[in-house]
Amino acid sequence: MVSPGTRADDEDLGVEEALALLRESPRRPQEDPGPSHGDPDPSRGGSGPGPSHLGSGPSHGGSGPSHGDPRPSHGGPGSSYGDPGPSHGDAGPAHEGPGPARGGPGSSRGGPGGPSHGNADGPSRGESGPSHRGSDPAHRGSGTSQGAPGSSPGAPSSSPGAHHRATPWTDARAVAERAARSAARAARREPVSVPLDGALGLTLAAPLTALTDLPSFDTSAMDGWAVAGPGPWAVRDEGVLAGHAEPAPLTDGEAARIATGARIPPDTTAVLRTEHGRTDDRGRLHPVRGVVHGQDIRPRGQECRGGDQLLPLGTLATPPVLGLAAAAGYDTLTAVPRPRVDVLVLGDELLTGGLPHDGLIRDALGPLLPPWLRALGAEVRTVRRIGDDAGALERAVTTSDADLVVTTGGTAAGPVDHVHPILRRIGAELLVDGVKVRPGHPMLLARLKDDQHLVGLPGNPLAAVSGLITLAEPLLRTLAARPAPERYALPLRDAVHGHPHDTRLVPVVLRDEGAVPLHYNGPAMLRGIAAADALAVVPPGGTRSGQEAELLDLPWATAGIGVCFT
């Protein structure tokens, strides 16, 4: 059983459908364009009235169970997602095991005097802390009135219902997939021819067809002797090595030393393995066990014949796929191009070296994001550190021609949180403005152009990882025409307390057919995710010990392509 919090099956993009987008010639209009998105009214955040700014996704404006998701509502009928109490931070008790609560219902959720982010026994309670800004609990999601569905123009940012306007986690992932499909249609990207050494992680845009027979000649499967007729055999002086021209034929009663992979001499009966033969004082070869006709000979075409389809289009180019392509005679592969990504790291408080000091902290996302994005199949073109300069950020966004722009921090409503104002100014379409997930609530997804999007990640490191998984992964996977990962669930060894209304993503390690939740899983922490094999999807309300939860594999913890950061 898979826990709530997965994509709906009808939202999965088939690889063949994604590949078909590459071959579509007519340009299609973007999905559900809705009204104009350049409204200067600051209370609406440039996102326009109503749900048209969520692309073709379901409406997420109402409280209670109606979020377009067939599973139970996040909080149940009558719950107030704008409640300024516990829902504004990671809920209640510690999230690992049955130990004592780390800040019960009466504790502060991330406000002054709340538990620090360095608490070893439980997560941090808010999404602020000593890391990148942009995640302060006072500014999560669309709580700053960024134009949530159903909001009235000019609604004050302090509206009690502002908090619950964020998009449910499953719906946000579906919106990202649909946005990528729309972008792929608009971009009309063509397949590319890529050398084998640059094709790792790409999706084949054409079937892999054998260019020759494999093997292309009869070869020896073992070191030993090529023999003709019944033994004993007289052994030739000259042996047969791999890579040499075709040897002279053997006559009955004759043998020749042969190496693995060498061409079989004409009229050979079998290959006698080294350990299965002995020579006498006269130099004659005797078998020590029976010899079967054709044994240890790989005949021409044993694996395939020229023209056979080896792999279908849509196959992910893993290291074995590259090896097979090379064996079949390929120098290049026809593949779906990598989505291009520009990364913009924001914040005057970030250091690129040395120890934190004087209110300055190390930039953790600059080193973290590029390899993670590459593991998702992207080509990371630039990583720029911009600081808190609104003009520089606007220039970087508007001059980028990448398929995806990723920003870090600045997605809330603080004095130097410039992402929302810039998106309003340039007329971007806000598709997702806050997600019902912890950590990472204030993430966003915007359409800059028909074929270009921006993912705004929260500044706290683990919250940014949540944004990568929620919004960037489905968008990049769809653009790259990669197959959706298989969904699976495992029982959690310890109980995990959930947020009252939101999905939680909790780092876990996999042990003995189960998953063990990790400590240090607060929004500003990387210690837990650095040791993790996966993230557990914990539904609102939490999970009991032994209850199954859906798991999201981390790219480097899965078999195959994920381990290769290309």
Image: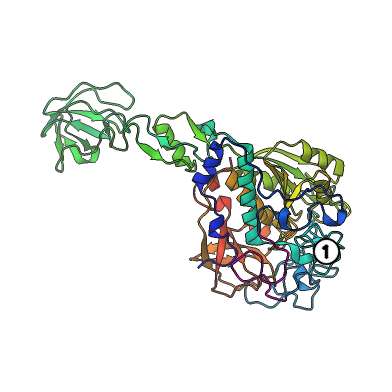
Q: Residue at x 49, y 43 (%)?
A: 316
Q: Position of residue 38 (x, y in %)?
A: 81, 47
The residue under label 1 is: 138
Along the line of sight, the residue nearer the viewer: 270 or 463: 463
Q: Give the residues in magenta.
A: 58-78
Q: Position of residue 62 (x, y in %)?
A: 72, 67
Quarter holding the C terminus is top right
Give above or below for 263 relative to 561.
Answer: above
Along the line of sight, the residue nearer the viewer: 451 or 240: 451
Give above or below for 470 relative to 296.
Answer: below
Q: Residue at x 41, y 40 (%)?
A: 311
Q: Residue at x 54, y 47 (%)?
A: 563
Q: Residues within 10 Å of mark 1 (few under 14, many from 20)?
A: many
> In the rendered structure, does residue 513 fall within the stretch colored magenta?
no
> In the rendered structure, does residue 67 fall within the stretch colored magenta?
yes
Q: Residue at x 11, y 28 (%)?
A: 252
Res 376 seen here: no
The part of the image, by quadrant, that contains residue 395 is: top right
Q: Main secondary structure of the magenta part?
A: loop
Q: Is residue 91 left or right of residue 223?
A: right
- The kind of residue tagged 1 is Ala
